[in-house]
Amino acid sequence: MTSIHEIFFQPSQKMDSIIDESIDLIVTSPPYPMIEMWDGIFSKQNPEIQEFIDKDDGFNAFQLMNKELDKIWDECYRVLKPGGFACINIGDATRTIGKNFRMYTNHSRITEYCEGIGFQSLPVILWRKQTNAPNKFMGSGMLPSGAYVTHEHEYILIFRKGAKKDFLTVEKEQRRKSAYFWEERNVWFSDLWELKGIKQNILDSRSRKRSGAYPFELAFRLINMFSLIGDKVLDPFLGTGTTMLAAMASGRNSAGFEIDENLFDTIYESMINSRENLNARQRSRLTEHQEFIARYRIDKKKEPKYFNENLNVPVMTRQEVALDLMIIDEFVKIDHRKFEVQHSSCPPLSGISF
Ligand SMILES: C[S@@+](CC[C@H](N)C(=O)[O-])C[C@H]1O[C@@H](n2cnc3c(N)ncnc32)[C@H](O)[C@@H]1O
């Protein structure tokens, strides 16, 4: 099979190149309102934002930054298919403006807006990024009452456009191919993810110093949890292209919008150099599954009930018997902004007898 991946270096407030109801899943992380590194990007989009910051008016700056994001959530709603999911990674911001330290609650502001335009909220994931940094305890130390709780988590907000999707008969086979393993479900569908953050350096000096990128694993899980092989995934804040890489690894199509054209080299370099790593992540799903089955046999002293012929492995449930893992055979650049990826099914690992 072939998948197509397109980058648009345009602001995502208007995603005119994406037609209504053509996207199956959105996985994204916007610039976080009131986190200082994004002040410049927001103020370019609305100069009043900087004026409020200069006047020590954090609340109104926060509101205007979120109003810029609101335009993009409207566009996300327009382009998503009914029943499609939008997964938004967002952190709240702690900040001192003037002499006032407070929290700016982006996750609740975005949730309220998205519900207002018709999205339905689903249970969220807390992404916990525990740190050992000595300065994580903020405020007055051991003296009450001016100390603050540590801030070591972000949110992955999960919305659905309208009611649950009914799958057509022709889609059912693809849905079964796109299944995940039982033991993956148990980890991925838990409300607490403890994933390490990643190195944030951008090498291109024309761009900003830190990328704000999320880990590959975060996008990879969400894509496999909420879309089917062959579906189209959109990231309206593409950054270094993590969502696009995860879509490629998973046999999905993708489109990404990014305002900073200087990120092209970073995105392109990682695309052409990542094939082996992306395939390794898919293959690791199979080896980890084999290890899981080996432990199951020892612990339970019995065989799993079902068997997956594609991968030549036992599986826990009937839903996993047609599960297929896509790997990348070839990566072709069609033009400066468009890429084609050839995929095939991951062969079963040889040399291990079941
Ligand atoms: C938090 S970063 C996304 C990082 C990305 N998830 C990754 O893994 O690299 C947000 C990105 O959105 C871009 N951005 C900000 N405002 C934008 C807009 N209106 N339209 C498109 N991109 C925008 C920024 O340049 C930045 O690269």
Image (cartoon, rainbow, N blue to C red):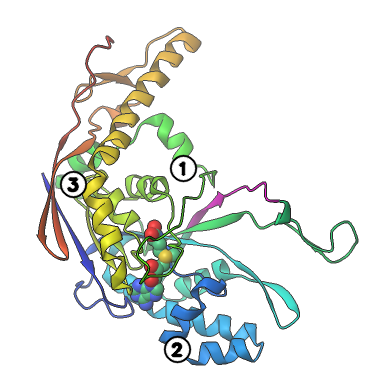
Specify whether 123 is left or right of 217: right
Bounds of the magenta segment? 122-133
Q: Which of the image's four quarters has the C terminus?
A: top left
Residue drawn at x 33%, y 64% is 238
Chain-order first, disc 2 or disc 3: 2
Asked if 23 appears above or below 300 in the picture, the reply is: below
- Mark 2 near mark 3, Cβ–Cβ under 8 Å? no
Q: Is the CB–ligand 1 distance for label 2 below 8 Å?
A: no
How crowded is the residue under tag 3: few (<14 C-alpha within 10 Å), some, or many (20+)?
A: few
Q: Position of residue 309 (x, y in %)?
A: 20, 21
Residue position marked by numbered label 2 in the rendering: 46
Residue position marked by numbered label 1 in the rendering: 189
Residue position marked by numbered label 3 in the rendering: 171
Residue 218 visible, this angle: yes
- Callout 3, which amino acid? Glu
Residue drawn at x 42%, y 85% is 44
Chain-order first, disc 2 or disc 1: 2
Q: Position of residue 33 (x, y in %)?
A: 53, 74
CA gap, disc 3 and disc 1: 23 Å
Residue drawn at x 47%, y 71% is 115
Q: Nearer the viewer, mark 2 or mark 3?
A: 2
Q: Position of residue 164 (x, y in %)?
A: 35, 56
- Callout 1, which amino acid? Phe
Chain-order first, disc 3 or disc 1: 3
Task: Give the structural element (helix, strand or loop) at label 3.
Answer: helix
- Residue nearer the viewer, 104 or 187: 104
Q: Quadrant of residue 211?
A: bottom left
Q: Quadrant of residue 192?
A: top right
Q: Position of residue 52 (x, y in %)?
A: 59, 90
